[in-house]
């Protein structure tokens, strides 16, 4: 199986701070699962868990990395670019801590009365572990009350510009001065420690902010639903959609060791992935293609494509289908901003020529097909019961167990159980079947037979 997420110079942590949590435990558990779920879209390394910033950072020191991305429960990585931008930031800036700087020192807004120092919002921070260790693991610094004893702290040179409003400076720079004040925002001592040691504290770059969001603590189901309205839209919309283009590459096929022609293919009803599998490993003329999907429109589209497409000029076929039928389309980050013509040319390049697609299609159309409407995260048996114990069998399930739909509806425990059932049921039916997909944490599962994977997992 392919290993991913190796050689990263950082580790990700999630802390469940009791002071920063929803009083409704059901809601809090949902917020925690959502944080874990979205972290796993582009991060495959270990996740550290704890109850405070210092707790997870102390544990991070046990890992052979230089940085730690600390998330509070409720933080959401909405786009995989978050990690790419963070990685670039690590290589460019010398810092102890980067995050959401909040200014309560400057009397520049209704929010800030002044003399309250600076702090960092708990939702997400990036910490240089070398400095954390060098500075003797300074305490995070919980917000104080106005009547608490003042602190003697390092004074800051505030950047003139803000990220938004007038209390989020781009950075605070060290000075030679000190001041006495009562810090009213969490994270004040991390800022103080950084300034004392001559290091600028940076605010998260707007590009990082655009790739993330935070679900604030609440005891109201209605408020949680409002904050997660975009997730609910995905949950309601996805089972009614058609993937006209693949949202993933074909890299996984390079790791599949099957050496016999395909005789039984069990596959999601998604664009060209089933066909590139057949084309890559070849297939018998009596092969059977077993489509399954939780989207009835996706299955219907594949049926229609089988009957109506001639293997040429796929964009023209799409336009014809859009005019003749009504169906919802869905995209991924690799396809949502591209034209049909561009994606067709990309597909042609992956195949090595349009003529190869057309020749494949002529053979493919003569194959026998079955169609199964099933949500494998709920009950996989409608499709696993179709699996036969014969050589040349391949099954592809993509990231069906790591989708917004699966995790939001079933939770991490539920989808973990569903995935285990999926693997067990397939193994019972055909222990020699070749597998392609992702597990419930989006880790690649590919390249071997399910009997070997079942033993390792």
Image: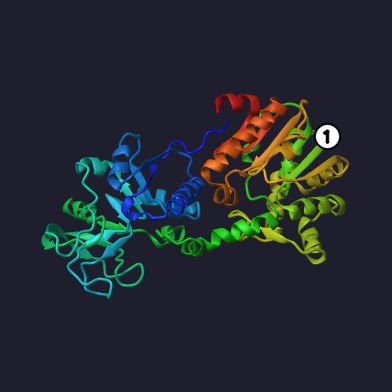
Q: Residue at x 68, y 46 (%)?
A: 375
In the rendering, at what x and y percent does residue 264 appear?
A: 78, 33
Q: Residue at x 71, y 52 (%)?
A: 295
Regarding residue 378, the answer to whether it shows in the image is: yes
Q: Going by the image, does 294 lie left or right of 222?
A: right
Q: Going by the image, does 382 lie left or right of 29?
A: right
Residue with the mark numbered 1: 287
Q: How many marks?
A: 1
In the rendering, at what x and y percent does residue 392 appear?
A: 76, 28
In the rendering, at what x and y percent does residue 71 appear?
A: 38, 50
In the rendering, at what x and y percent does residue 300 appear?
A: 79, 53
Regarding residue 441, the answer to whether it shows in the image is: no
Kindly state the secondary structure of the residue where label 1 is placed: strand
Q: In this picture, is 102 found above or below 375?
A: below
Q: In this picture, is 178 found above or below 246?
A: below
Looking at the rendering, in which quadrant would you find the N terminus? top right
What is the basis of the colouring in this image? rainbow
- Asked whether 256 or 15 is in front, the reply is 15
Q: Residue at x 82, y 47 (%)?
A: 358
- Asked whether 356 or 31 is in front, the reply is 31
């Amino acid at each position: 199986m392919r290993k991913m997420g190796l050689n990263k110079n950082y580790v990700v942590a999630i802390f469940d701070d009791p002071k920063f949590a929803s009083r409704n435990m059901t809601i809090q558990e949902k917020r925690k699962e959502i944080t874990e779920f979205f972290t796993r879209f582009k991060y495959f390394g270990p996740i550290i868990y704890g109850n405070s910033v210092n707790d997870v950072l102390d544990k991070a020191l046990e890992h052979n990395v230089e940085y730690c991305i600390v998330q509070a429960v409720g933080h959401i990585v909405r786009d995989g670019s978050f990690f790419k931008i963070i990685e670039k930031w690590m290589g460019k800036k010398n810092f102890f801590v980067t995050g959401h700087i909040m200014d309560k020192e400057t009397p520049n807004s209704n929010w800030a009365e002044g003399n309250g120092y600076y702090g960092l919002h708990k939702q997400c921070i990036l910490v240089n572990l070398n400095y954390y260790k060098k500075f003797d693991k300074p305490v995070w610094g919980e917000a104080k009350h106005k009547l608490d004893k003042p602190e003697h702290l390092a004074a800051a040179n505030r950047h003139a510009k803000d990220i938004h409003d007038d209390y989020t400076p781009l950075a605070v720079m060290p000075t030679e001065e000190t001041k006495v004040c009562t810090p009213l925002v969490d994270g004040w001592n991390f800022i103080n420690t950084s300034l004392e040691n001559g290091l600028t504290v940076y605010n998260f770059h707007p590009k990082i902010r655009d790739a993330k969001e935070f679900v604030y603590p609440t005891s109201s189901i209605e408020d949680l639903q409002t904050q997660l309205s975009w997730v609910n839209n995905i949950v309601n919309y996805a089972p009614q959609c058609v993937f006209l283009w693949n949202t993933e590459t074909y890299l996984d096929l390079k790791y599949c060791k099957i050496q016999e022609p395909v005789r039984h293919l069990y596959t999601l009803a998604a664009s060209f992935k089933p066909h590139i599998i057949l084309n890559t490993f070849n297939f018998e003329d009596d092969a059977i293609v077993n489509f399954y999907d939780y989207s009835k429109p996706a299955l219907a589209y594949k049926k229609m494509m089988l009957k109506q497409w001639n293997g040429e000029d796929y964009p023209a076929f799409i336009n014809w289908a859009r005019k003749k039928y009504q169906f919802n389309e869905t995209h991924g980050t690799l396809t949502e901003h591209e034209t049909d013509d561009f994606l067709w040319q990309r597909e042609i390049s992956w195949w090595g020529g349009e003529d190869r697609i057309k020749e494949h299609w002529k053979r493919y159309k003569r194959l026998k097909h079955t169609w199964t409407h099933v949500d494998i995260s709920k009950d996989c048996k409608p499709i696993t019961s179709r699996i036969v114990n014969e050589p040349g069998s391949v099954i592809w399930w993509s990231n069906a167990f790591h989708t917004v739909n699966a995790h939001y509806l079933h939770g991490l425990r539920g989808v973990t159980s569903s995935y285990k059932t999926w693997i067990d049921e397939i193994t019972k039916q055909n222990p020699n079947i070749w597998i392609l997909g992702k597990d419930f944490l989006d880790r690649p599962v590919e390249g071997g037979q399910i009997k070997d994977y079942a033993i390792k997992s």
